[in-house]
Amino acid sequence: MRLRRRDSNLTSGTLEAPARVDRRTKNLIPRLHVGDIAVINHEDLDRVAAEGLVSARVAAVVNASQSLSGRYPALGALLLLKSGIPLIDGVGVSAFNSIREGETISLVNNRVFVDGELKGKGAKPTIDELERRLELAREAVRGELGEFATNTLQYLADEPELITDDLDLPEIVSSITQRQVLVVVRGIDYREDLSTLKRSGYVSEMRPVLIGVDGGADALLEVGLTPDLIVGDFDSVSRDALDCGAQLLVHAYPGGEAPGAMRLERLGFEYAVVEGLGTSEDIAMRIAFEKSAELIVLVGSHTSMADFFDKGRRGMASTFLTRMKVSSILVDAKGVGRLYRTQVRKRDLALLVLSAIFTLAVIAVVTEPVRLLLRTLWLNLGM
């Protein structure tokens, strides 16, 4: 067992475990093993990143930055503590840079050691403290709202072609025309919503085209589904997802800059480029719309101002315009999952009818009175 832990709360004891280090939490999560200590540099730790750390069952998290700066209500730190994962916060960039991937580090109270040498120290927030700070952040975010709205409106004025022009699309291997499309983003509640859709029978019954947006491709694989297309900058797509057989569409920014293309070229994967304004999530929805999808079902989408702060964006004009453009066929996965569970599917109804016919046939074969009754009915109908 790699983990040696004397006090999970880190109040007076020591925790020792291998360190896994990355500036980008979403790139770190796939490398984590149970019992590792995640060393990150993530200001305002968002809920999705924290859920990934919890799912990886890390022993503790050391953050070089403030997990809750107070600028807006980032929920990640509170989620970690409520899940029983200790957090040492704000140890600083120098401490972060001094810790190497895979080396054993020791956490003693609020201090971080490697081979007995102090590398840094930070704060150990409590649940009560974080809840108080979150309340203050909710008040502070009102001050951010004006700037956020201004940025959004400025974008709307500067980039109207986002809604008026179509994308220059390459050939899409999967036929989308008049089919439903399931677009999966690794956002809030994506695991729960995707699992609900699968359990409800929606995926098996409707057989939608599956589009994974970056890490959304791995989310599909997690529940046993294989994406047909993967769209994004490919910074957080696993090798398993790249190998799954999906068509790879790299999102390029206006002017042709496509950071994801370099990674795919290095790994030897074929890909096509889609150039367009907005986020990769926006591009995925526009592809489905412009290829005449019957319906777009969206999992894990980013819709609130907090979602966009989590992504480091200062406005949401591209998403606003994209949703306006595709609104006639766009639905949220939560609604689809709830509605689909309440409906009797045609396949289920057909199976029920066939079962009833089979039961009657068996009874007719083994029961003389029933055979006589059915023969009489048949003769009457023949008249």
Image (cartoon, helix red, strand yellow):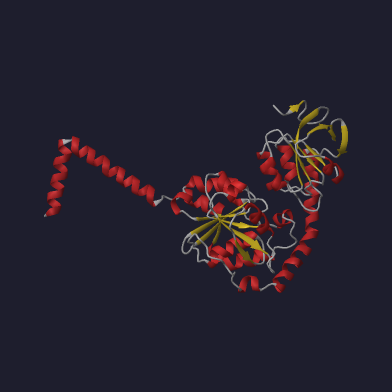
Left or right: where 239 falls relative to 148: left
* Quarter holding residue 117: top right
Query: Which x, y percent locates residue 243?
Result: 57, 49
* Location of the N terminus (image quadrant): top right
Q: Nearer the viewer, residue 56 or 366?
A: 56
Which residue lies at the image location 57% right of the left edge and 67% below the top edge?
A: 169
Answer above or below: position of 99 versus 383. above
Q: Nearer the viewer, residue 126 or 10?
A: 10
* Quarter holding residue 128: top right
* Location of the C terminus (image quadrant): bottom left
Left or right: where 19 falls relative to 353: right
Q: Inspect this view and state whether residue 148 appears.
A: yes
Which residue lies at the image location 55% right of the left edge and 49% below the top edge?
A: 244
Q: Inspect this view and state whether residue 303 appears.
A: no
Which residue lies at the image location 69% right of the left edge and 72% below the top edge?
A: 159
Query: Which x, y percent locates residue 102?
Result: 75, 36
